[in-house]
Amino acid sequence: MARGATVPGGRPNRLRPGWLAAGVVAVVVAALAGLALGPVRLSPLGVAIQLLDLVPGVHLHSGLTDTEAAIVTQLRLPRVVLGLLVGSTLALAGGTYQGVFRNPLADPYLLGAAAGAGLGATAAIAVGHAFDAVAVDGGAATPLTVPLAAFVGALLAVGLTYALGVSGGSGRGSRGGRYRSPAALILAGVAVSSFLTAGQTFLMQRYVDTIREVYSWISGRLSTAGWHDVLLLLPYAVVMAVVVLVHRRQLDVMSVGDEEAASLGAHPERTRIILIVAASLGTAAAVSVSGLIGFVGIIVPHTVRLLAGSSYRVILPLSVLFGAAFLTLADLAARTLLAPTEIPIGVVTAFFGAPFFIVVLRTSRRT
């Protein structure tokens, strides 16, 4: 069992109101920054008033021109909301995988879930006529098929990674499927991701007319012209968040080991399956609308663990908030640092995430 995921002393920490308030403030600040900053800089106060004016029955004068108001409500607001949803989903999935696998290096991207979802989404786009439900028209696809295909791919990828990275119940020296080593799971994830990426590349070469659409989200992107991507992701994100947060106490119990957790009345295998399915569902939906955005699931949960506490009663709720704020700010950097050119958001998160991953890897090896 990886020690990075355990609760010191076996006693769960409580979520302090101060940290909860800090998470809410981080989300509000990140959202206002994402709405106010860009090629056209707007007054944060004016943006806040403009948002309040959207509330039914409220009539306020924000001081923004009609063009500036349209930039806020029609262009930036859907993108910011999508960033909040994707960031919270990926961060929550990362924290969930770390708790389920009891491994501090577990992450939706590194476990192959993102690659599996990417292959499923690519297959749905490239051979949509076989499903008779996908229509490629300027990058748009029907709301159900792409996330469903991505979900199946993500679930299969995580299952294969789990089978390869965990010693089986009948294996020599295994104890109910414990890890061979913290690195084994990651190596299995790299192997599975490489295999699935090869399949994705094959499909892209077979269906050349879809390369541009697929490539646009391989590097990660939050560019959206409306609310369709938000509405597509929202139900999956809500279901995942409810399931995971309901089981967050079980993760604290499972951190002491399956045998001990079972003796305390928990059902570790059933809980593990439920959480893997829920986290894979959220990851698949996020990947289907935003592309392959890596390292969010490592950076945010580990930062929360270091600063606020090691209990999953603390890590998971705060990962939702700080993950939303982190990706929104990363997207702001992606579209402003080299404006008018936009950097793929996956490049921005990798810039911060790769060094962070190295630090986590060195720390886990020492423990």
Image (tube, grey):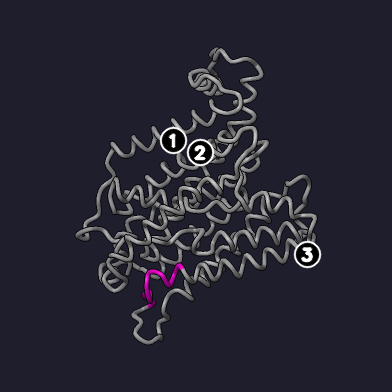
The quadrant the C terminus occupies is: bottom left
Asked whether 114 falls inside the magenta stretch, the response is no
Which element type, helix, strand or loop, lies under badge 1?
helix
| Magenta range | 177-186
Question: Which residue is found at the position 57% from the left and 62% from the top?
Answer: 154
Which circle's residue, 2 or 3, is located before the other in the chain? 3
Amino acid type of the residue tagged 1 in the rendering: Val
Picture disc at residue 206: 3
Q: x%, y% of residue 232?
A: 62, 46
In the image, residue 41 sits, relative to residue 10, either above or below, namely above
In the image, residue 27 sits, relative to residue 303, either above or below, namely above
Dot 3 alpha-carbon crowd within 10 angstroms: few under 14, some 14 to 19, many 20 or more: few
Q: CA distance from mark 1 to mark 3?
A: 42 Å
Please give the residue where the numbered disc 1 appears in the rendered image: 27
Q: CA distance from mark 2 to mark 1?
A: 9 Å
Question: Which residue is found at the position 49% from the left and 21% from the top?
Answer: 44
Dot 2 alpha-carbon crowd within 10 angstroms: few under 14, some 14 to 19, many 20 or more: many
Q: Is residue 117 visible?
A: yes
Amino acid type of the residue tagged 3 in the rendering: Arg
Q: x%, y% of residue 65?
A: 62, 15
Which element type, helix, strand or loop, lies under badge 3?
helix
Please give the residue where the numbered disc 2 appears in the rendered image: 328
Image position of 134 (left or right of 59): right
Image position of 352 (left or right of 235): left
The quarter of the displayed image where residue 68 is located = top right
Amino acid type of the residue tagged 2 in the rendering: Thr
Question: Which residue is found at the position 42% from the left and 81% from the top?
Answer: 168
